[in-house]
Image: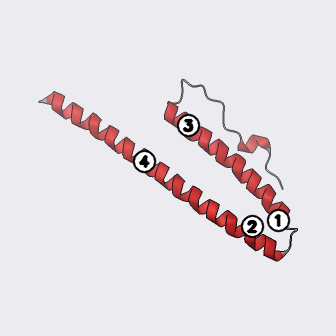
């Protein structure tokens, strides 16, 4: 059963509701969803091929997937680190003003 378009689309939000970073993250998730759809289509195509071709394709896919996973982890880590730095600046700035 294929997912319908309505289940994969995000609710409409205006640019005023989101920060640029949040919009970028949503855009990346949308791009990821499209890539997952392409992956599902490719896997359907590969299902009809001989086993050796499937194994070669899966090895290549595994390499690409691990690279994407590593990049995603690094991006999330970077965002969390930036938020901690930003929060630290906010807390540090309010403490200096109280003295």
Q: What residue appears at the point 78 percent right and 42 percent down from the top-left corner?
A: 5
> Sequence order check: which comes first, mark 1 or mark 4?
1
> Viewer-proximal residue, 15 or 74?
74
Above-or-below relation of 79 to 65: above
Q: CA distance from mark 4 to mark 2?
A: 32 Å
**Kind of element beneath mark 2:** helix
Q: CA distance from mark 1 to mark 4?
A: 36 Å
Where's residue 66, x and y in %? 58, 62
State yes or no: discs 1 and 2 in contact (Cβ < 8 Å): yes
Q: Which mark is residue 78?
A: 4
Q: Which residue is at 52% across, 58% downward?
A: 70
User: Quick check: 3 left or right of 13?
Assistant: right
Which label lies toward us, 3 or 2? 2
Residue occupied by mark 2: 57
First in sequence: mark 1 vs mark 2: 1
Q: Residue at x 15, y 29 (%)?
A: 98
As measured in the structure, the alpha-carbon distance from the residue carrying label 4 to the one carrying label 3 is 14 Å
Left or right of 4 on screen, residue 69: left
Residue 94: give x, y in percent of width and height.
22, 31
Disc on the earlier residue, 1 or 3: 3
Q: Quadrant of residue 85?
A: top left
Q: Residue at x 77, y 57 (%)?
A: 40
Q: Secondary structure at mark 1?
A: helix
Of marks 4 and 2, the one in the foreground: 2
Q: Which residue is mark 3?
A: 24
Label 4 Cα crowd, 10 Å radius (few <14 / some 14-19 / many 20+): few
> Closer to the camera: disc 1 or disc 2?
2
Above/below status of 37 relative to 49:
above
The numbered mark at residue 46 is 1
């Amino acid at each position: 059963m294929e997912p319908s378009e309505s289940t994969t689309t995000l609710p409409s939000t205006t640019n005023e509701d989101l920060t640029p970073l949040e919009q970028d993250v949503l855009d990346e998730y949308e791009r990821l969803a499209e890539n997952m759809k392409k992956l599902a289509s490719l896997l359907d195509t590969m299902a009809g091929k001989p086993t050796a071709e499937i194994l070669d394709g899966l090895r290549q896919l595994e390499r690409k997937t691990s690279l994407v996973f590593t990049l995603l982890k690094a991006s999330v880590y970077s965002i969390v680190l930036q938020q901690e730095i930003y929060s630290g600046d906010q807390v540090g700035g309010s403490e200096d003003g109280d003295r």
